[in-house]
Image (cartoon, grey):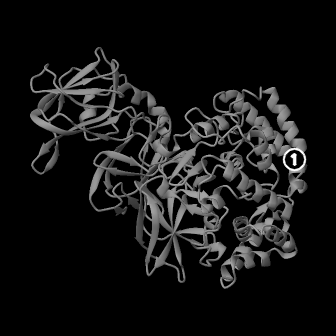
Amino acid sequence: MSNLRFTLYLVLIFLVACRQESSLERALAASGDNRKELELVLDYFRGDSLKYKAACFLIENMPGAFAVDEEIVAACQPFYQMYDSLSHTYDYDSLSIYDQYPRGKDWGRQIDSLWNAYSSYNNEKLKKDMCIDIKTIKASRLITEIEQAFRVWKENVYTRNYSFETFCDYILPYRQENGLLVDSARQVFYSRHHGQFFANPGKNMIEEADSLLRLYSYIGHSGFHATGIPIWDVATLEKLRHGLCTHKCWHNALLFSSLGIAAATDIVPAWANRGSSHSWSVLIEEGDIHPFNPFWEQDLWQYKRLYSNMDYHKYWGRFRLPKVFRKTYRYYMEGPLADGVPAKDIPEAFRSLRKKDVSHEYFDTVNVRIKLRKMPSGTKYAYLCVWNYNNWKPVHWGKITGDVALFSGMGKDIVYLPMYCMDGEMVVAADPVLVQKDGKVRILYPEDTREEMVTTQYTGVLAYPLNRYNNGIITGTVLKGGKVYGRWGDTLCVFPEQIELNSQRLQVQSKDSVRYVRMMLPTKGMALGDLKFYKKTASGEESLKNVRWLTELPLSYKEESADCVLDVYSSTGYRMDLDEKYADLDLGECCRLAEVSFCPYLDVEYRENETYELCLWQDGWQVVTSAKGGTFLRFTDIPRNALWLIRPVSQSGRKHVRPFVYETGEVYWY
């Protein structure tokens, strides 16, 4: 594969360097002995101006596209059969990796073992060179693909009036992913579903798409077992019935485009508040998008809400996306590769021109300017990176002017580290920055001022599923106020269904002044880490300092006092069963409230038999101090405005630790 990447890179550099020639001439020149096949296509459509333009579009953007050798797929057929037989012993039709976890895990172990043995024995057969489209594709295949694309475009009641540009980008392309075989998959899909979907007016496109996807709900996620299995065509994926998100994404794109629906794959190169990356499917209307989970689920179309950088998943918590790119067949001549930067000085994620920045279609973005330091001579680009699986992963490039790099369209409420790429290595270019919710950039560098830190967790949002029990205890809590104790008036606020792992502020709607507050709990129990009240003043808002409990609350099973809820630390708290479904407070004065903030009770992640290191970032993670686990960790005399990380000493390379910023008793995870 390394030789192929080198070859493709030379092709791309050739395209960039020969700007004086037309795109079509450059592509034909790169086709070698296959030029006659491409010219046959052009001659075939020369009498139809629109189809001729479509043919030119495919050929102009073809250099760099490639497929696996069909012999690799043929060599894997005995393995596919063994895979199928093994899966049937686990009741293939009902096997779900996640819903039936023990059986799925056992199935996965056996699949892994089977593939390791087969691939080792057939190693040489699986090493075939790739087939470069521009040098191998046949005229008959291109003509068939173009003719079908035009036919389904005009047959589709939803897309027939889309622009030619949208058609070329999302319906016309025969290839959805490099490596895939160029076969008759789209013709097969068309024969299966023609006339059943997207053909009759008066229906809803998303409802029809939902029904179509349900037909392929038998294809599930592999649970990351045997990820090296070659799956390079639709027939193989449908036979194996399990794959990764990338596999199901190209399956969906081929399926929908075969029926005239504009479809693509969108990717986040690295999550900004958890590990890994992700790819998903998207249907495209002119002026709107409909992203969805590539694998079937009941709540299929929630991605636009979840990936807005504003909302939360009921089980997984919040997702934060630094960038979103769309995989494309079209070249986008921008960035370091188009600017002639050597491949060794470009992160692998940006060694392709077949992607389009679509971040603005999902969330509010901001352009970020970073002043750099230690800039190597001749460096043209820097990269913004996010912490991901125990490393800084690049998510976007920025062109350097002087000593400042400009990064366009970045996600907010995210910590980034500016870096250079030098000979394949990422090198720190500046201090980490927090791009705040309002778009302002804050440099994270330790200050001389000191404070005390109290924490209970070190994995950030990954603790969200474990904390759902605590969140459920207080979800729907109603706060009522009154001037006289026992006479409760208007509702002040209600705790929402979706609760973060740090403090949330709620606006108080009532304009009446109050002295006493009753918490009307949904159950006979409390699970709070923090509770604060803010009053209106002439200059804005001010926190109330003398709040106390009126209800006598017992020590918790962990001997926690309810007063921990009213201290300055959100990580200390109180969880306990109560005799009543309410608890009362005295605010210490009669005033008009502006806001109430609360934090759920946070379970301690620190194990009793483990030591944990507190690290701050200064051109690398520097160990400041350490402490034994078993309870919340308290660190004194630590600098403010730093980027922090806590990691278990015995697992210093653990990939699920998350960085955070600490401010006035509150942990903010990134």
- The residue sitting at the bottom extreme is 20
Identity of the amino acid at label 1?
Cys
Location of residue 434 in the rendering, given as x and y in whole percent from the top left corner: 39, 59
Does residue 356 sit above or below 294 in this rendering?
below
Location of residue 563 in the rendering, given as x and y in whole percent from the top left corner: 24, 30
Does residue 461 sit above or below 587 in this rendering?
below
- Image quadrant in which the N terminus is located: bottom right
Location of residue 299 in the rendering, given as x and y in whole percent from the top left corner: 55, 34
Q: Is residue 198 left or right of residue 441?
A: right
Quadrant position of residue 79: top right
**Mark 1 highlights which residue?**
76
Nearer-the-camera pick, 218 or 84: 218
Q: Is residue 332 left or right of residue 233?
A: left
- Which structural element holds mark 1? loop
Nearer-the-camera pick, 151 or 462: 151
Quadrant position of residue 584: top left
Residue 322 visible, this orientation: no
Few, some or many C-alpha atoms within 10 Å of disc 1 (few <14, some 14-19, many ≥20)? many
